[in-house]
Image (tube, helix red, strand yellow):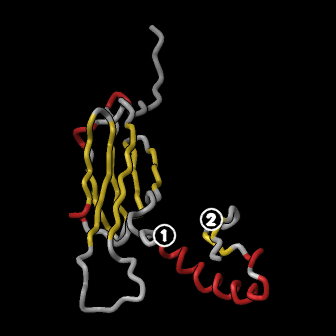
Amino acid sequence: MNNLMLTKNRNILQRDKRNLGNYGGWASLMDELFNDELQLAKSKDFNKGLSNPKVNIIESDEAYILDMAVPGFKKTDFIIGLENEELSIAAEIKVEEDTKENYTRKEFVYASFKRTFLLPETVDDTAINASYTDGILTVSIPKKEEAKPKPARTIEIS
């Protein structure tokens, strides 16, 4: 009798060993061999996609600087858009299937992400620019003149 159940601790299918009699050791060995295969089958799309890339945002008196760690992309892979004070950054990589090689495992197939940022009203959205160097996408979001801090001054009494 083949009794399969979903275990709560590992979320994988395992054989129910209660009714296996003298074959318990054999069942354990088979579970060790095949549980890895079940996990691979369950997560075969593990590396399809990309978790949200890490971002650092620096605010200066003049601008906001957004640095995003996205190694492995080219400048042409990015789509940066602005709509209704929302900045969106997206990228997608598709690797052509290579039928010449007999891969045991292949994870270099597809990667994509999309991040959005709500911009404050104090930014000059007509002057946003971006650059990509050494795996870091840098987006410079300048502030409007009225949002920049004014230098301290003294006021004469008349």
The residue positioned farthest toward the front in the image shown: 1
Instruction: Using the image, tell me which numbered label, if any, was put on residue 11.
Output: 2
Q: Nearer the viewer, residue 105 or 67?
A: 105
Residue 49, by quadrant, is bottom left
> Could you say where residue 144 lies in the image, as x and y percent from the top left?
31, 33
Q: Amino acid at mark 1?
A: Ser
Vertical order, 83 against 37 (above or below): above
Residue nearest the viewer, comparing 82 with 33 = 33
**Residue holding disc 1:** 43
**Mark 1: secondary structure:** loop
Q: Which residue is depicted at the point 60% across and 78% down?
A: 35
Residue 124 percent location from the top left of the image = 28, 36
Q: Residue at 23% of width from left, 77% of height from top?
A: 96
Q: Position of residue 79 (x, y in %)?
A: 25, 54
Q: CA distance from mark 2 to mark 1?
A: 12 Å
> Which corner quadrant holds the N terminus?
bottom right
Look at 36% across and 57% down and name the residue there: 113
- Quadrant containing the C terminus is top left
Mark before the other along the chain sequence, 2 or 1: 2
- Depth check: give the residue in front, 158 or 52: 52
**Label 2 amino acid?**
Asn
Side of 143 where 76 appears, left or right: left
The circle drawn on residue 70 is: none
